């Protein structure tokens, strides 16, 4: 059965390591017959939440690209969230997106989640907090299911992920959506 897959690439570098893993996931998911869209968050205008709670009245007071992204999140069967590790956590682009879902978070239900992370460091625990940020978000969403995690460790310069096992893992995980 074909699924709608939404890839949210939080990389601030187009062609950066986590963005390249998103592309491999996308390639695998498309080859398996899924409808896939990738959103490069840096190219979108997503302001931070200002906690005004205007959304309690039906819509967010901030007029930017987040309303469109939220519609796509609601429409997707599977959501891929990707971020490089910055100070053991997700980057600003992904954090702003997560916080801005507050306008409609109760509507984001029954989604399959995949997480992609990259880091310059290669330690065992370098991605623990980043993964917990992703999992914490999904835990707030009714019926969410974690389907897979891809770890791209020990990569810093853009493109150094190429040729690593993480590239093949991303492709294969995409094929399994």
Image: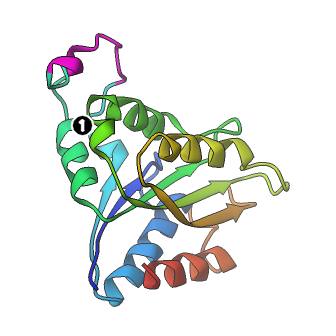
Residue 132 locus on image (x, y percent): 64, 44
Q: Residue at x 34, y 89 (%)?
A: 31
Q: How many numbered dots are placed on residues in this image?
A: 1
Specify whether residue 56 is painted magenta: yes
Quadrant housing the C terminus: bottom left
- Residue 128 vertical position relative to residue 24 in the rendered view, above or below: above
- Residue 147 vertical position relative to residue 66 in the rendered view, above or below: below
Q: Which residues are magenta?
A: 48-57
- Main SS of the magenta part reads loop
Residue 89 locus on image (x, y percent): 64, 38
- Residue 50 vertical position relative to residue 168 in the rendered view, above or below: above
Furthest residue in direction top, as rendered: 52
Q: Which residue is mark 1?
A: 66
Nearest the viewer among 156 and 101 is 101
Q: Residue at x 42, y 54 (%)?
A: 143
Q: Is residue 4 visible?
A: yes
Q: Residue at x 35, y 21 (%)?
A: 49
């Amino acid at each position: 059965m074909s699924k709608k897959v939404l890839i949210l690439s939080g990389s601030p570098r187009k062609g950066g390591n986590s963005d390249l893993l998103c592309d491999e996931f996308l390639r695998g998911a498309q080859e398996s017959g899924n409808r896939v869209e990738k959103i490069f968050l840096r190219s979108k205008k997503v302001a931070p939440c200002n906690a005004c709670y205007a959304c309690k009245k039906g819509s967010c007071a901030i007029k930017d690209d987040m309303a469109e992204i939220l519609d796509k999140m609601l429409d997707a069967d599977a959501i891929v969230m990707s971020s490089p590790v910055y100070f053991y956590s997700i980057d600003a682009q992904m954090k702003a997106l997560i916080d801005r879902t507050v306008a409609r978070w109760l509507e984001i239900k029954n989604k399959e989640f995949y997480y992609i992370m990259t880091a310059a460091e290669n330690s065992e625990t370098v991605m623990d907090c980043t993964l917990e940020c992703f999992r914490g978000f999904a835990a707030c969403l009714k019926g969410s299911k974690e389907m897979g995690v891809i770890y791209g460790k020990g990569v810093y310069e853009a493109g150094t992920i190429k040729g690593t096992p993480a590239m093949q893992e991303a492709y294969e995980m995409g094929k399994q959506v």
